[in-house]
Amino acid sequence: MRSDARAPDEPEPRTVVARASDERGEIALARRGDVTELIVNGAFAMDTVHTATERALATLALDRLAGTDLHVLVGGLGLGFTARALLADPRVSHVEVVELHAPLVEWAREGLVPPIAGLLDDPRLSVTVGDVLDVVPALPHGRLDAVLLDVDNGPGFLIHERNTEVYRRQFLAAAVRALVSGGMVAFWSADPSPELAEELAAVADATEAVTLDVERDGRAFTYTVYLGRRGG
């Protein structure tokens, strides 16, 4: 969900650009110089300092998919880097983003979120304001080529407490059922989660954990993308 799931060092003062509350909590958009930050329920969610792992969530799944006319669902709009990486692949014909917080979508449309500038104008992209816990289980079976989940900082660092269900077997099974044969489900996690790996292995036909090293402010971080494939 971010380049650093822990509170970043702040060499420059933070200016809150927008703030809103809804039934899910509070969301704020802030800037430190030319850095854009997303803060949810008082927790640092992501910024624009390093975005390689957000993009890797998309490219790791795409690298494992065959064919064209790919349909992908992304849980969490964030600052748009995962969706943008998907749309950069000419094989992708449609990206559906499910975003919990309507204000973030409104700010993006109003131009308040520079990384998302122009993204929502792409005709291949659609945005649904909703909860992946409701949307994904309701999907028709075998509809999608990939489901990418980045709604927290991982199962060990929840932004929304209800999202503990995202990493449990019932939801994971629903995500796998929504895939075509050979489709991929992928989860971003700030820390290794053997429990998530075990739960995913119980419902997917093949699984993989890819570690991603990031250095920021002189500190090293290792994040993990968990991938599961639906077999034929």
Image (spheres, grey):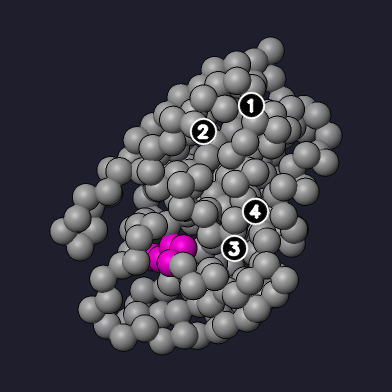
Circle nearer the N terminus (4, 1) = 4
Q: Amino acid at mark 4?
A: Arg
Q: Residue at x 33, y 40 (%)?
A: 212
Is 226 displayed left or right of 218 in the figure? right
Q: Residue at x 64, y 22 (%)?
A: 203
Question: Can you give x and y, in whole percent of width and height, for residue 106 in the image?
Answer: 67, 75
Q: Which residues are magenta?
A: 44-48
Discs 4, 3 touching: Cβ within 8 Å: no
Q: Amino acid at mark 1?
A: Gly
Please say if 68 is above or below 4: above
Name the residue beneath numbered marker 4. 162
Please say if 8 is above or below 142: below
Circle nearer the N terminus (3, 1) = 3
Q: Amino acid at mark 2?
A: Leu
Name the residue beneath numbered marker 2. 196
**What secondary structure is marked by label 4?**
helix
Q: Which mark is residue 119?
A: 3
| Camera-nearest label, 2 or 3 | 2
